[in-house]
Image (tube, coloured by chain):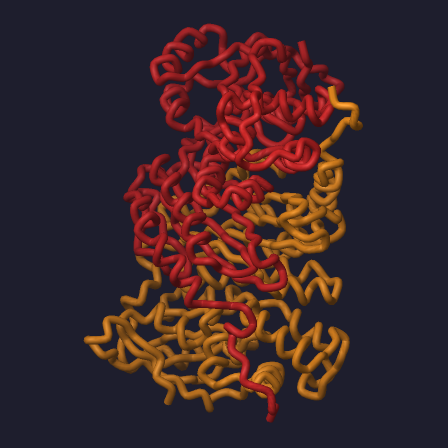
Chain colours: A red, B orange
C-alpha cells in the first residue's frame, strides 16, 4: 500500500458536485425550452424527441455543429457569459434555415478546466433561453471538466442543432437562376466570425480596453459592440420559406460573402456591389486600424450583411413588403449571373 | 492609415488553408461512412438525412452529446490521434443504445489552438471509421481554430449522435421488475471516464512514462492500456434489442455502476456483488497506487464492466446463448430488488 494520502476524483480536479450545481441552476431554463416533441426530462442518457408531435414525421432532417470561436475570449474579458450561448444557438439556427429547415432541437457541450457553477450555468441558460425564444428545445448536453486540457478559467462552448424540412422545400441551389436578385439582411455585428483578427487589432494594435468607447462605436463600449448577439433570421424569414418565396439563402459566416454565397447558388455566379450598403463603424474601425486588405476583410467578416436572400424578381415586392412589415431593413446587393461552365462552380464577382 | 503592416486572418492565427487540408485528408473516410439516409455531400451548411430511406420515419429520435475527456491528454502524450475519434463515436453509440436506439448519424467538432492538418484529419478520420464500422453516417462537423483559447498543441473533440427507436421499443425503465437479473459485459479499459484521476496516479504519483510496461498490464504499455478504444456494444446487443429480450441497459460511464445503473431501472434498487467479476489489472494498479477508496473507485471508474443488461430470468438462457455465439463473455453481477418507496428513486446496494 502507498503511504501517501488516498486520492479522490476531486483531488484530480474533477468536482462532480460543481457540475451538478451548474445543471441545477440551469434546469428551469432548460425545461422552459421544451416543446411538444420532447419526451422525458433533463438527465437521461439521450434526449427523446417525437417528430410526429411536431408534424415532421415525413420530413428530411438537417443537422449542423458549431462553436462560438474566440468571441468566448471577449465574453471572458467582459465577464458576461449568457450572450455567447445565444450566439451559438442562433448561429446554428441560421445554418440550417438556409436549407429551408425549421429548428427542432439543440444539444450543448461545455468543456472547461474547472467548473465554476455560475459561469457554466450562464452558458447553458443562454443556450436554453435562445432555444425557447426561437421555438426549439434544448434536448441535451454535456459539461466536461478537463483539468490540464483547458487552463483553469478557459472553456469552449459547442452546439449541435437538428431541424426538419419538408422534402419538396429543401433549398439546395436547384431553384437559382441568372437574373434573380440578391437581398441582404443586416448583421448585428461580427456575429461569430473573425474574432481572432478583431481581437488582434482592437486589443493588441489599438490597445483598447473592453470598456472603452471609441467614436466609431457611437456610444457603445468595445465589449458591447463585440458581444452583440449573433441574430437569428428565423422569425423574419420563416413565413417566406413556408410560402416558397425564397430560391436560396446564404448565412454569412466564416468565409464572408465571398465563400458563403457560392455555396448555395448551384453553378451560378453572384454579382455583388459592395457600395450598396453602409459598412458599420465597427468593421471600418477594425479594417482601417489593421490595414486589412479589402478582399481579406470580405472573406473574414460579414461586413454588415448577415444573410443573403436569392429571389425571383417577381417575388421582390412581396418579399420586401413582408420584411418591412416585421421591421426589417433590407438592401439590394446584387444579382445572380450565369457562371462560367468551365469553372465547375460559381463565384462572387464584385461589381 | 496605420503605418504598421497590413494584418491578415493568418497573422491572427487562423489558417483556413490548414483547415481545408485537414478536411480534404479526411473526406474519403467521411464519404465511406455515408449510409442510404444521407443526401448531398461533404461541405453543406447542414447535413441532410432522410429517415424514410432507413425505414425510421415513424420512430422517436434519441440524441446525445459528449466529449472524450482527458483521454485526449494521453493521446497527445502517445502521439496517436485516431483512436480518440473512435472512443467518442462508440461512447455516443452506447449512450443511445441504452434507450433502445439504432444510431443514424453523428457530427464532430474539433476545437484547437492551431490546426495541424495531420492531427485534425486523424481525429476526424477516427470518427468516420468508427461511424462506418457501426453503420452510422458522419453527417457533419466543424473545425475551429482558436488561438489564445486553446494552447497551441491542445484540442478538444466533441460529438453529437442522433439515433431512432420504434415507439414501442423505447427502453425507459418501465419494464424493470424486482427479480430480474443483472448481466455485466466487460469493458476494454477505462473507456472514456476517470482519466484525470488515472493520469494523476500513473503519471504523477507513480511517475510512469507512456511507454513503460508495468507488470500489472501484462505486457502492454501504459499508453496502450489507457488508449484501448471505448468499445461499442451495438453489434452484440442489437439482435437482442430487436427481439425485445432486454428490459433495460445501463452504459457505465462517469459515475460508475453506482450512478448509472439507477438511471435506467425506474424506482427499483440494484443489488450488485462486486466479487462476481475479476477487476482488470489496470484498475487495480490505479486504485492501489492512488489509495483510492473502494466506493470512490466504483463511482469514478467502470472497474471492468462497461454495460449492464437487465433481463427477465426466463430470458437469461436465450440472452446468454446469443452473446456466447458472438464471442461475448458475460457475467452475472446481481439482481433487481424492490426500491424503498420513500426514497423516490432506486440505488445500488452492494451485496
Percent across and percent down for residue B226 are 65, 73
Q: Residue furthest bottom?
A: A1
Numbered marks: total: 0
* Quadrant in which the C terminus of chain B appears: bottom left
Question: Looking at this view, is B333 or A120 the one in front?
Answer: A120
Left or right of B229 on screen, residue B117:
right
Residue at the image position 43 percent from the left and 58 percent from the top: A117
Question: Looking at this view, is A300 or B174 the one in front?
Answer: A300
Residue at the image position 55 percent from the left and 37 percent from the top: A210
Percent across and percent down for residue A105 are 40, 43
Percent across and percent down for residue B69 are 57, 62
Residue B295 against residue B20 in the figure, above or below? below
Residue at the image position 34 percent from the left and 80 percent from the top: B270
Left or right of B100 on screen, residue A287:
right
Percent across and percent down for residue B156 are 61, 54
Residue B148 against residue B262 in the figure, above or below? above
Question: Looking at this view, is A166 or B140 the one in front?
Answer: B140
Kindly tell me whether residue A318 is visible in this rendering: yes
Left or right of B204 on screen, residue A138:
left
* Quadrant in which the N terminus of chain B appears: top right
Residue B290 against residue A81 in the figure, above or below? below
User: Which image quadrant for residue B36?
Assistant: top right
Left or right of B228 on screen, residue A8:
left
Q: Residue furthest left?
A: B342
User: Which image quadrant for residue A149?
Assistant: bottom right
Residue at the image position 72 percent from the left and 45 percent from the top: B22
Amino acid at each position: 500500500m502507498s503511504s501517501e494520502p488516498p486520492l479522490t476524483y476531486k483531488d484530480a480536479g474533477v468536482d462532480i458536485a460543481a457540475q451538478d450545481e451548474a445543471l441545477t441552476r440551469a434546469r428551469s431554463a432548460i425545461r422552459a425550452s421544451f416543446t411538444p416533441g420532447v419526451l422525458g426530462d433533463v438527465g437521461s442518457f439521450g434526449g427523446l424527441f417525437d417528430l410526429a408531435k411536431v408534424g415532421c414525421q415525413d420530413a428530411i432532417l438537417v443537422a449542423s455543429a458549431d462553436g462560438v470561436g474566440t468571441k468566448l475570449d471577449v465574453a471572458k474579458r467582459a465577464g458576461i457569459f449568457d450572450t455567447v450561448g445565444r450566439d451559438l444557438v442562433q448561429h446554428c439556427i441560421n445554418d440550417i434555415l438556409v436549407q429551408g429547415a425549421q429548428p427542432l432541437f439543440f444539444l450543448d457541450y461545455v468543456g472547461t478546466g474547472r467548473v465554476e457553477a455560475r459561469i457554466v450555468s450562464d452558458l447553458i441558460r443562454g443556450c436554453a433561453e435562445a432555444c425557447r425564444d426561437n421555438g426549439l428545445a434544448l434536448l441535451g448536453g454535456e459539461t466536461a471538466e478537463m483539468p490540464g486540457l483547458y487552463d483553469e478559467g478557459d472553456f469552449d462552448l459547442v452546439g449541435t442543432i437538428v431541424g426538419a424540412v419538408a422534402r419538396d422545400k429543401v433549398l439546395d441551389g436547384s431553384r437559382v437562376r441568372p437574373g434573380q436578385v440578391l437581398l441582404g439582411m443586416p448583421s448585428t455585428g461580427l456575429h461569430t466570425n473573425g474574432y481572432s483578427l478583431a481581437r488582434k487589432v482592437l486589443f493588441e494594435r489599438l490597445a483598447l480596453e473592453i470598456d472603452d468607447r471609441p467614436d466609431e462605436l457611437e456610444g457603445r463600449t468595445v465589449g458591447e459592440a463585440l458581444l452583440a448577439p449573433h441574430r437569428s433570421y428565423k422569425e423574419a424569414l420563416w413565413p417566406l420559406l413556408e410560402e416558397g418565396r425564397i430560391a436560396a439563402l446564404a448565412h454569412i459566416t466564416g468565409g464572408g460573402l465571398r465563400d458563403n454565397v457560392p455555396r448555395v447558388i448551384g453553378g451560378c455566379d453572384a454579382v455583388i456591389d459592395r457600395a450598396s450598403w453602409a459598412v458599420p463603424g465597427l468593421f471600418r474601425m477594425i479594417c482601417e486600424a489593421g490595414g486589412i486588405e479589402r478582399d481579406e476583410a470580405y472573406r473574414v467578416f460579414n461586413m454588415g450583411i448577415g444573410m443573403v436572400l436569392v429571389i425571383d424578381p417577381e417575388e421582390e415586392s412581396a418579399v420586401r413588403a413582408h420584411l418591412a412589415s416585421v421591421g426589417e431593413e433590407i438592401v439590394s446587393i446584387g444579382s445572380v449571373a450565369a457562371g462560367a461552365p468551365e469553372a465547375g462552380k460559381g463565384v462572387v464577382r464584385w461589381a
